[in-house]
Amino acid sequence: MNKHRLVIANLKMNGSRKSVRAISQFIIQNKSRLSLVDLIFCPSDIYLERCIDDFQGIDTIQVGAQDLWSDNLFGGTGDTSAEMLVDLGVSYVIIGHSERRKVHQENDPLIAKKLESAVARGLTPILCIGETQEERIKGDTLKVLARQLKGLLNFTESVASKLIIAYEPVWAVGSSKCAPLNEVNSVIQFIKGQFRQSRREVNVVYGGSVSETNLIQLMSLQALDGVIVGRASLSGDRLMEICRLS
Ligand code: PEP
């Protein structure tokens, strides 16, 4: 039997009112392709409200933000809090994306604060973790992932069961290289194993140059709960093909 999977569309800092609307309209017209998939659509904050309106009443589509700023951090000029996202009707939030870890120097303690804030407001966090190419070559992948996961293992069962872990090798994101299947599989087993040690189940998705072409192979991994898609989500047609094949 086919497994029900998640497809997370991370539009990053792309699109315009017109192009994001064109993608959402295409999704709505083709929503029958979502029979075995839950789509989490994550546009830039400024398009969130329109997308929530567009997808109203379609229970296989949820809207997510790409980041938040924790309530208990100082200031916040230019940022968006968990409370504001909930007020809009957002249900998911990506936290710790490698682009933010690199460009905005987000570290594990800051990310932990953001996670707490999201969870306290009832948002489901999609936590991105992954190793750089250098760490991979040194054979440090699992060590890096264990460090990035550390704070999460203390969450209660009810929180952990709602978490989505996105394994996104930094070297694969935005490149043309999808991670080899055996590496993705052993990382998923590792992450799930870490949570099982404290009797918790968690959803794990893969991200990093996912396309219609490499998706079928990825879907052969029974333990994989879905994918996170960056560039390919900028075309409604490509995104819905990925949903159909998932
Ligand atoms: C991402 O940025 O989360 C991502 C998965 O990007 P891409 O699919 O373009 O590699």
Image: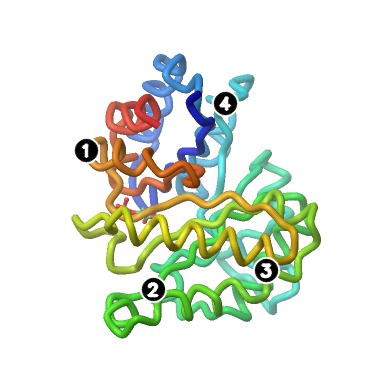
Position of 218 with respect to 213 (left or right) is right
Mark 1 / mark 3, whichever is N-terminal: 3
Residue 95, position in %: x, y? 55, 62
Q: Residue at x 61, y 77 (%)?
A: 110
Look at the picture and state if 72 lies above or below 12: below
Please state which amino acid type lies under the numbered disc 4: Thr
Amino acid type at mark 3: Leu
Secondary structure of residue under mark 4: loop
Quote the CA–CA distance across marks 2 and 3.
17 Å
Which is nearer the N-term, disc 2 or disc 3?
A: 2
Foreground: disc 1 or disc 4:
1
Of 194 and 149, the residue lying toward us: 194
Residue 177 quadrant: bottom left
The residue where tag 4 is placed is 60
- The residue carrying mark 2 is 131
Marks 4 and 3 close (CB-CB < 8 Å) = no
Residue extending farthest to the bottom is 138
Tell me the kind of residue under disc 2.
Glu
Q: Which residue carries the number 1 mark? A: 213
